[in-house]
Amino acid sequence: MAEKDELGRRGEAVAASWFESRGYVVIDRNWRTRSGELDLVLRQGATTVFAEVKTRTSVAFGHPFEAITPAKAARLRRLAAEWCSAHRPDGDVRIDAVAVIDAWSASPSIEHLAGVA
């Protein structure tokens, strides 16, 4: 289990750097409540973005986005609402998904889908 956790942390770091290189500002990481955890909370201009990061070593057992089920999307919406209630952001909000494949390589594959939930 520790390897999986380490891979997930590495994927989140890769995703955070990827977002920052595109002008996003990371405002929260691994925000937790009893309901679950938000991987990344970012600002892009006037928009607050909640990013779910899925990391895999390869696509041999499926694409990372396949792990975002309707139940997971519903939980992300609830968590985003909790974060907004606690922080009262201005502007729009959006939930995105990021797939990081081969996070330990010098050039991991990163895919970003905006507005998934």
Image (spheres, rainbow, N blue to C red):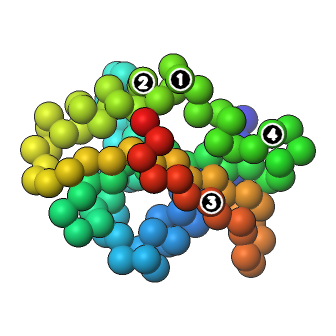
Q: Name the residue under label 1.
A: 70
Label 2 and label 4: CA atoms lie apart by: 21 Å
Image quarter where the C terminus lies is top left
Closer to the chain start, of discs 4 and 1, is 4
Q: Is residue 78 left or right of residue 71?
A: left
Label 1 and label 3: CA atoms lie apart by: 19 Å
Image position, residue 59 (x, y; %): 83, 48
Q: What amino acid is labelled 2 in the image?
A: Ala
Q: Mark 4 points at which residue?
A: 62
| Residue 82 in which image quadrant | top left
Q: Mark 3 points at which residue?
A: 111
Q: What amino acid is labelled 1 in the image?
A: Pro
Front residue of this view, candidates 89 and 12: 89
Image position, residue 108 (x, y; %): 72, 69
Front residue of this view, candidates 29 and 25: 25
Label 3 and label 2: CA atoms lie apart by: 21 Å
